[in-house]
Amino acid sequence: MIRRIEHEGRLIAIVVPRAHQPEGIEFFTPNDFSQQLAAMARPAGYVIPPHVHKDVPREVVHTLEVLFVRSGRMRVDLYSPERAALGAVELGAGDVILLAAGGHGFTMLEPTEIIEVKQGPYAGVEDKERFEPR
């Protein structure tokens, strides 16, 4: 059910549909990705012990982002790193997409609420480059 979209051996996006039901914990991203994505299902009474995350220096060169569609429907147009169109995926309420490489654009097919998660700090106008689709 998990959809991995690749171009020339490079991961462009991962789509986790609402209907996906993990068993235990399931990571979708490789360990070396600067943004990690996983799904978890645990039974009532399962305990995750209290913990803190240590300060570990990391270098983030490329921004990855995760979109959680809370409601509505949208189309995500995907592009290669060279800006060539690769196709599109449609997402609905409860679907999740990790955008890992290349470009992307969005068209809302109905009123849509999205939660976006990406690394920071935000670099303002230096953070993205807009382009004309081809």
Image (spheres, helix red, strand yellow):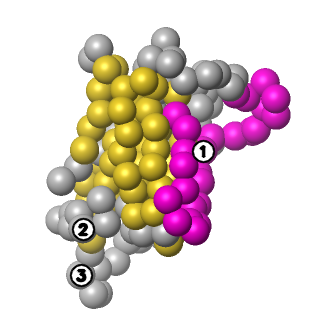
What residue appears at the point 46 percent right and 37 percent down from the top-left corner? 77
Residue at mark 2 to residue at mark 1: CA–CA distance: 24 Å
User: What percent of the width, then of the height, locates residue 17?
Assistant: 30, 59
Reply above or below: 56 against 92.
above
Residue at mark 3 to residue at mark 1: CA–CA distance: 29 Å
Q: Is residue 74 magenta?
A: no
What residue appears at the point 50 percent right and 59 percent down from the top-left corner? 109
How many dots with numbers?
3
**Badge nearest the viewer, 3 or 1:** 1
What residue appears at the point 42 percent right and 24 percent down from the top-left corner? 85
Front in this rendered view, residue 22 or 65:
65
Q: Which residue does the numbered mark 3 point to in the structure image?
A: 43
What is the three-letter code of the residue carrying label 1? Lys
Q: Is residue 117 visible?
A: yes
What is the three-letter code of the residue carrying label 2? Ala
Reply above or below: 44 against 103.
below
Q: Is residue 50 left or right of residue 60?
A: left
Mark 2 is surrounded, within 10 Å at the Cα level, by few (under 14), some (14 to 19) or many (20 or more) other residues, namely: few
Per the rendering, the mark at residue 37 is none
Q: Which residue does the numbered mark 1 point to in the structure image?
A: 118
Per the rendering, the mark at residue 19 is 2
Mark 3, secondary structure of its residue: loop
User: What percent of the width, then of the height, locates residue 44?
Assistant: 27, 87
Report the span colored magenta.
104-128
Residue at mark 3 to residue at mark 2: CA–CA distance: 18 Å
What residue appears at the point 70 percent right and 40 percent down from the top-left corner? 120
User: What percent of the width, then of the height, locates residue 12?
Assistant: 39, 29
Upstream in sequence: badge 3 or badge 1: 3
Front in this rendered view, residue 25 or 78:
78
Within the image, what quadrant is residue 61 found in? Answer: top right
Mark 3 is surrounded, within 10 Å at the Cα level, by few (under 14), some (14 to 19) or many (20 or more) other residues, namely: few
Mark 2, secondary structure of its residue: loop
